[in-house]
Image (cartoon, rainbow, N blue to C red):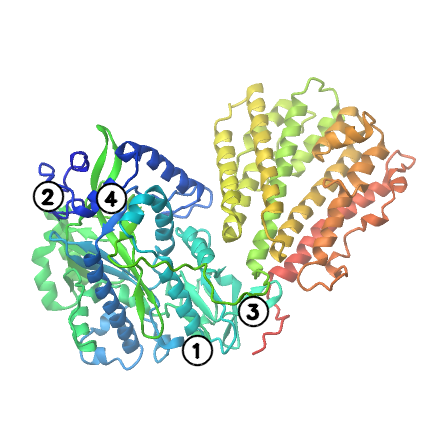
Amino acid sequence: MAAALAPAATAGHFDELRARLSAGPGAQGPVCAPWQRFFEQMGPGGFADLDRRTANLERQVRDNGITYNVYADTHGPQRPWSLDLFPLLVEPASWARIETGVLQRMKLLDRVLADVYGPRELLQSNLLPPALVQGHPGYLRSMHGVQPAGGTWLHIAAFDLARDAQGGWWVVSQRTQAPSGLGYLLENRLLISRLFPEAFRGLQVQRLAGTYRALIDSLRAHCPAGGEEPRIALLTPGPYNETYFEHAYLARYLGLTLVEGSDLTVRGDRLYLKTLTGLERVHGLLKRLDDEFLDPLELRADSQLGVPGLLQAIRAGNVLVANAPGSALLESTAILGFLPALSRHLLGEPLALPSVPTWWCGERAALEAVLPQLSGSVVKPTYGNAGAVLGKQLGRRGLDEWAGRILRAPEDHTVQAYLPLSQMPTWKRAPDGNRILPRSMMLRVFAVSDGPGAWRVLPGGLTRIAGTTLDIASMQRGGSSADTWVMTEGEVDQSTLLVSDQPAADVRHRSRTTTSRAAENLFWLGRYTERTENTARLARLVLESLNGEDQSSQRLIAWLGALAQRNGLVLPAVPVATQARRVFERSLVAALGDSRNASSVGFNLAALRGAASAVRERLSQEQWNLLVQAEEDFRLGCQALPGRGEQASLEAIRLLESLSVATAAMTGAQTDRMTRDDGWRLLSIGRHLERLGFLADAMGMAFETGAVQDGDGYEALLALFDSTITFHAHYQRRHDLPPLLDLLVIDRDNPRSLGWVTQTLRGRLARLAGSAGGELPAIAQALPDPAAWSLELLATRDAAGQPRALLALLQSCAGAAFHLSDALAARYFEHALDRHSVGA
């Protein structure tokens, strides 16, 4: 049935489904044995069930929050990862050739780096042109003469492979600086293996975990820890990087601390992590950052992503960086053309896995040879990865233009032979019905260190599938990915990262390290969660009051209008609500989803997601999905609101009610789904600081405007404190001052009361890092002590009818929240002063 459903690959391309050169769509032929076994073991639903599995796969990608962004957009939605239903099947014999060739290349490339940053014999013997090494922007002169920690230059490398028309594998390019894909291929494996469990077992697919464990064990062994327990961190450019999902995922999977450059500092030629408890030594970095950004002191001075002094710490041998800085020159396509001779010279053997024929135009003989062949070649930049130009897609004029460019700057251009990419089966919803369609693909395989001078190849890889273009398999050009199943004839490796050789008696509780940056983002995650909830509740209350049956309370409208303006829900130029209710109402509705207005509900929700994305490795998948879904629903809901009129307000109220439910769920997840470490305490402190300031300010304005003296205003204040049901259960329909203050100020069992919030804040601060046990830290002294509050005193009014003691307390609470926020930032989030010992 598969043969009938699947047209043959494009003529001249290797057909993965039939394991032979394709003669074109008219000559399908039988399916090869591995694919036949795959289709036979798909499960009882067979081909009829593939649509359901496709929908399930897309849902899982969304639910798992797997994203890949071509361009970072701080305001727009993230792009979901694209994953095809069928895996690429690689037979044992084919994989054996790949594995042998990749291991040989790792050994060769490591020796090349050791030479060009050491004796430079390859340059002196003309086996490598100096222009390709010392002329490459990625060659770091500051690394010359350096012996990297552990003696290994390359700990991870990726090789992009393509198949020729006869099914042989060729290396098209290699990535050595910070190759991406190790996290995405793990997610691909988890998702696809669950959709086809019978086929996965039946085909004896090799597992991946053992290779990841070997990488971590090797990095730990190479770290210059001096007898200490090695601390390894994963260095990321940050949440706006297109592959940030992978960075957070890998850090969590490998058990590494996810850090940005601002989390690290160099003191005394040693690398340290800025944490809430001070500076902690870092012995190893797994970097996902290009070399040029690593150290603004010696490399790019405008880099905000690196660590000043990092190269000096590397030269001093005090930190392992994988890969060692300076490997970018190996990513030049031109290097591929020199590897055959380098292999014979350095290893005494030919390359086991050939490179696609490659010519560097900086050599006159190569230039003269390739210019007449541009129509059947691929032109690539020698320095950098700006993109490839396929000669067969150029007309005569285009070929002449490129020939001129090459002649004007020959050293900047490299030409590769054109290799028609093999095509694998994909399941697509075609206009003429669902069927198996062939798509061009490339395979990225990874080699990782496995001890001194040793490497192993990950038995799988990241398969990239082209879109509608035959010859370009790129995720940045609309392509997709596929899982890669490497079949074995022997035993399947059952290794797992979950197994530990450490005796149970030696396991001791360890608090999770909280970096200063993570702490600050958690703090603001709490603040923006509370701020979003408060502004959503306030906006809903304003709209309900403006559209209520009894709109006679001017004091209520004046209070809510002033509070809305104070919290930025309407712009300052908008007329006050008591003068122009409908103008005020329309302005509030129009501003709800404005993510550029620094106080709108939409802005707070976007800022909440931004803070969460910076600490994504600390959040459960459910928490993240809840947040992303809430923001998307609110954004789309605001876009769909009617332009004006009563219907717009009613729709906005329903939208705000839905958001309030979502934020309540977020608060519940933060309370019930996170470990109580210092990071969580700062999240809780941020949320309660925001609550204290907002509620104290709102109550103060309610008394100043006199709104609380009206029945509607009294009820509105209870609603704003989310305490209506509790109040009426305790006090029925009373509307006097003492019961209001008892519940909203004094009661330390009501989580919305000022007394409870203040008491909770003091307790959280007392348990923060650096606080003496049982003592209230000095940082919390500004907070009023709820134990000293007197209901009788607070309810007493002066001759003008104002509760002066209450107003003074409210002002004190709001001021304390403001000043405590600054004090926390100075103490825990900044390391401008060296307040901690960084001993040897």
Circle 1 or circle 4, nearest the eye: 4
Give the answer, above or below, for where 361 lies relative to 703. Answer: below
Residue 474 visible somewhere in the drawing: no
Position in image of residue 640 (x %, y %): 48, 27
> Which comes sooner in the sequence, label 2 or label 4?
2
> Which comes sooner in the sequence, label 2 or label 1?
2
SS at mark 3 in the image: strand
The number of callouts visible is: 4
What residue did someone put label 4 on?
A: 38
> Which comes sooner in the sequence, label 2 or label 3?
2
Q: Quadrant of residue 656?
A: top right
Real-space CA distance between mark 2 and mark 4, rounded to the nearest whole angstrom: 25 Å
Q: Is residue 340 left or right of residue 255?
A: left
Number of residues whose C-alpha sits closer than 10 Å to that of mark 3, classed few (under 14), some (14–19) or many (20 or more): many
> Which comes sooner in the sequence, label 1 or label 4?
4
Q: Label 1 amino acid?
A: Gly
Q: Tags 2 and 4 in contact by the CB under 8 Å rule?
A: no
Real-space CA distance between mark 2 and mark 1, rounded to the nearest whole angstrom: 55 Å
What residue did someone put label 2 on?
A: 11
Give the answer, above or below, for where 697 lies relative to 642. Answer: below
What residue did someone put label 1 on?
A: 317
Real-space CA distance between mark 1 and mark 3, rounded to the nearest whole angstrom: 17 Å
Q: Label 2 amino acid?
A: Ala
| Residue at position x 82%, y 44% in the image | 808
